Image (cartoon, helix red, strand yellow):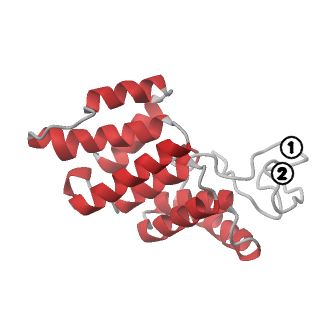
Amino acid sequence: MSLEVKTLNCPACGAPVAPGDARCWACGSSLYVQSFTNVYDLDPQALNMGVREFDEVLSKAPGDAAALFSRGCLNLRLGLYPKAERDFARAVQADFNAPEAYLYHAVSLARGKHIDSVPMDTIEEMKADIQAGLAAGEIAGLYLLWCIIQQYCYEERGLLARPSSEELYEKACRAGVTQADVDYLYGLLAG
């Protein structure tokens, strides 16, 4: 799997690219990480290389929301949760209309712990991210994360959860959840 990063040179073909370009003019490759699933299978060396590439991009354009999101995904996969949390928070500040940034900010707040061991004040912060993300745009991952929270933090403890995890899973399915989304989020929070 190749890493999709924004650099001064295209990571796929090496062609020079301008800051702010989303795709390489020469080969058409994406220059940003589009989703956490893009980096999930990368080895630590490739992940660290991507972080360094985005460090360089962000030194020139510190408010680049896509670069912040991209570096956040890499840091999240490396298990560098405080760094990922900071990157996603800055990405949200730079672009309030990025539901994926809210999603992964919420995930990074769990710090790699099983969701049922995350303190309730953090769960409430995660739920606030979910609500803000849904206001920015409905994506399957936000419903799926909310489903996981309802299931493990409320329903399995015998507490009433509204909406229920089943209702939220149905919404995630209608929003286009994939098996990869399920596997990755459950792996990060409930594995």
Query: Which residue position is annotated with label 2?
Result: 13
Residue 112 visible in image? no
Q: Give percent across and percent down for residue 69.
A: 60, 58
Instruction: Give the residue drawn at x 82%, y 54%.
Output: 21
Q: Give percent across and percent down for residue 163.
A: 28, 33
The answer to whether the residue labelled 2 contacts the one labelled 1, judged by CB atoms less than 8 Å apart, is yes
Residue 126 visible in image? yes
**How would you rate the neighbour count of disc 1 (Cα within 10 Å): few for under 14, some for 14-19, many for 20 or more?**
few
| Quarter of the N terminus within the rendering | top right
Q: Which residue, as the protein is rendered here, is positioned at the far front?
A: 135
Residue 8 found in image quarter: bottom right
Q: Which residue, as the protein is rendered here, is positioned at the far bottom?
A: 59
Which amino acid type is shown beneath numbered disc 1? Cys
Which amino acid type is shown beneath numbered disc 2? Cys
Circle on res. 27:
1
Q: Nearer the viewer, residue 110 or 129?
A: 129
Instruction: Give the residue drawn at x 70%, y 71%.
Output: 58
Instruction: Give the residue drawn at x 76%, y 55%.
Output: 11
Judged left or right of residue 61, residue 149 is left
Question: Distance from label 2 to label 1 (Cα)?
Answer: 7 Å
**How would you rate the neighbour count of disc 2 (Cα within 10 Å): few for under 14, some for 14-19, many for 20 or more?**
few
Q: Give percent across and percent down for residue 131.
A: 42, 47
Q: Nearer the viewer, residue 73 or 94?
A: 94
Q: Earlier in the sequence, mark 2 or mark 1?
A: 2
Q: Nearer the viewer, residue 102 or 162?
A: 162
